Amino acid sequence: MPAEPTSSAPPPASSSDLARLNTDLAIERTLMAADRSLMAWVRTALSMISFGFTIYKVLEAMQQQAGMPPPTESPRNMGLFLTALGTLAMVMGTIEYWVRLKSLRRDMRLHLMQPSLIMALIMSITGLGIFAGIILRLL
């Protein structure tokens, strides 16, 4: 008589275990979606900040060159506007992510200092510094 094969599979999970697993996976998917959204905010904000800063620096270099007429105020204002808008987008995206993390934290144990939040905070501070630097040079 052949021996019966032994199964090393775990016993079937209870319905409450499966429900908790599904909830945990849903929370993790939501966290990953929030991370992707924050990184989209970071990319957009960084593009606006760097483009605004570039416009400002190009116009400043043109103004310092001999024989070049000073640029109009409009491009400089556009550079300031893009830098301010990028900084505002970064701060808004960071706040949105922070609020999402706090709401997810009610359902699952999460660390508030996620890598994407740290990056967004660094970018927010950098954007504020660049914008403040431009404003101070104008005064």
Image (tube, rainbow, N blue to C red):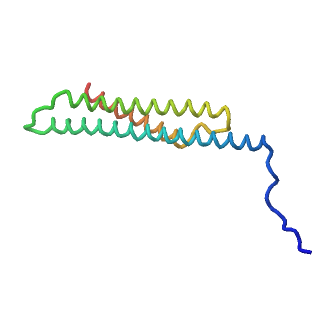
Q: Is residue 80 above or below residue 38?
A: above
Q: Residue furthest bottom?
A: 1
Q: Nearer the viewer, residue 107 or 1?
A: 1
Left or right of residue 61: residue 85: right
Q: Residue furthest left?
A: 67
Q: Nearer the viewer, residue 35 or 126?
A: 35
The C terminus appears in which quarter of the rendering? top left
Residue displayed at 52% across by 38% down: 117
Left or right of residue 114: residue 24: right
Residue 115 placement (x, y as % from top left): 54, 43
Residue displayed at 71% across by 44% down: 21
Residue 114 placement (x, y as % from top left): 56, 41
Left or right of residue 100: residue 120: left
Residue 69 placement (x, y as % from top left): 10, 33
The N terminus appears in which quarter of the rendering? bottom right
Q: Residue furthest front?
A: 1
Residue 138 placement (x, y as % from top left): 25, 27
Q: How many marks?
A: 0
Left or right of residue 125: residue 33: right
Q: Quadrant of residue 71?
A: top left
Residue displayed at 15% across by 35% down: 63
Q: Residue furthest top?
A: 139
Q: Quadrant of residue 3?
A: bottom right
